[in-house]
Amino acid sequence: MYLLNRSSHSGLEDCTPHEMWFKQKPHVGHIRIWGYRACSAVLKEQRKKFDIKTRECILVGFYDTENLYQLWDIEAKELIKRRDVIFHEHIMGHPSLARNNDTTAARGEKVNILGQQVQHERTEKEAEELEDLYPVIKILKEEEWAGIPERVLSMQEELVQKPVPKSFEKAMTSGDGKQWLEAIKSEHDSLKRNGVYKWVVLPKGTKELPYKWLFNIKRKLDGSVDRYKARIIAGGHRQKKGIDFKETFAPVAKFALLRLLLTIVALEDLEGKQADIVTAFLYGELDEVVYMKVPDGVAPEIGDKYVDTDGLVRKFTEEDIRNGMAVKIVWLLCKSLYGLKQAPRCFYRKLDRVLVEKEYTRVVCDYGVWICKGEVVLIVHVDDMQMFGTHVGINKLIAALEMVFILKRLGATGDELSLGLGVERDRLNKRIALTQAHYATQVLLRFGMDACAEVLTPIDQKKDWMITKEDIPLNEKGRKQY
């Protein structure tokens, strides 16, 4: 009925019923084909900080109000009203709604919202329009792979075939479940080694913070997989100021000072090395009492100690592990954890205390820089370190830091800065240049422009682009003023 009222009728002299009744032409720019796949925004009141912000839906109707759609929420299985909707006009229906889901969906055949098979082949014009709208389609076409080096081809396949899971369940059910499990074990071992938590029974009247597993695939400069990384993030959005934390500010080095130090290094022909502190935030010591839920994939072992509500230290038995416990076991955080609001400040205080004990002086104008006169300058951005000075001073600083932290040495400053910038050093002419060639290449690959032609100036150089005052239209008031 909604569409009929907005369709022309021969009995009304090609006028629509809506126009005859309301004396104005109806707005039809928002109308889409019934059954299109859509993504609707989840209202802020219905989601938490780490929840997804959109949901997959199916278009099933319209409302009299313009741009208000009636959608079928696939996950919640209910009808909803939404204005903020993005339509995928090349996708019809959803496999979960198919009657013969196990056969058609398993074979990859398209089905409509009623579960019926859809046989649709795009015309050449439709395919070209889609390629213009989504340039990545061109990259993924089989004929476009011809002539691409194997190294780049393998990188593209990894980017397409290895999506990063968003939850623990998806990580375990993915094709890389074994690698993700090893990453989870590595993260847990790191927490145990640093004494980040203790097993305790949650006291009555207290609440524990939630957590989230964050997964990532670290890649090398050429795009190949370096390692799988898993990290436990505490739900800092549930912390209350004055109870769970007090101060949160942590200084970082200014980028202008980094450029200044690189200039001095080039002119004085000094040495430069860089390093990264492994799991840096886990070294910070907490002053507040913070409890957190036990993450999925982590469980106590037989013989591990825990503290009950009376303060007595007990051990987990085989029966406790097998049958579970009547009380609620949580983590008592002894050191800072990623996600806590005070985590950066706790690590900064720890680092500053270690450097001051080693007789390094913090620069007054930038609290992210420490100096040992005549030997070395240390510049820190969160956990990324750049060291400039003499060989003796740099080695002395690294030895002092490795007594407290686990460092990952990234080599000399000359190939790539840990901040993601490329470095080109010319010792003969005493020059250092910062580049973003890798970042630019990734942007070109992302939008399918890696094979574009190069030009020095992206405009017509022969045309006269001089602007005169006659080219600027001005009213009478403007002419008097200027």
Image: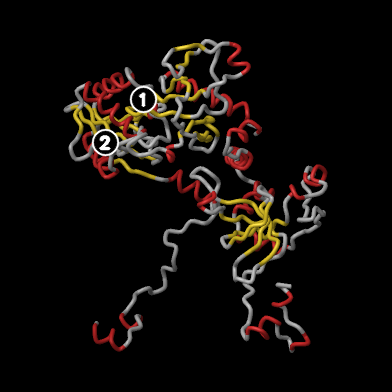
Q: Position of residue 292 (x, y in %)?
A: 46, 29
Q: Quadrant of the C terminus?
A: bottom left
Label 1 sits on a secondary structure element that is helix
Residue type at tag 1: Tyr
Q: Is residue 476 left or right of residue 50?
A: left
In the rendered image, which quarter is residue 416 located in? top left
Residue type at tag 2: Gly
- Tag 2 and tag 1, C-beta contact below 8 Å: no
Identify which residue is drawn at 78% across, 87% down.
11
Which mark, by number, is residue 368? 2
Which mark, by number, is residue 54? none
Residue at numbered disc 1: 283
Q: Position of residue 158 (x, y in %)?
A: 60, 38
In the rendered image, which quarter is residue 371 located in? top left
Identify which residue is drawn at 53% across, 55% down.
452
Front-lying residue, 131 or 280: 280
The answer to whether residue 156 is seen in the rendering is: yes
Number of callouts in the render? 2
Q: Quadrant of the N terminus?
A: bottom right
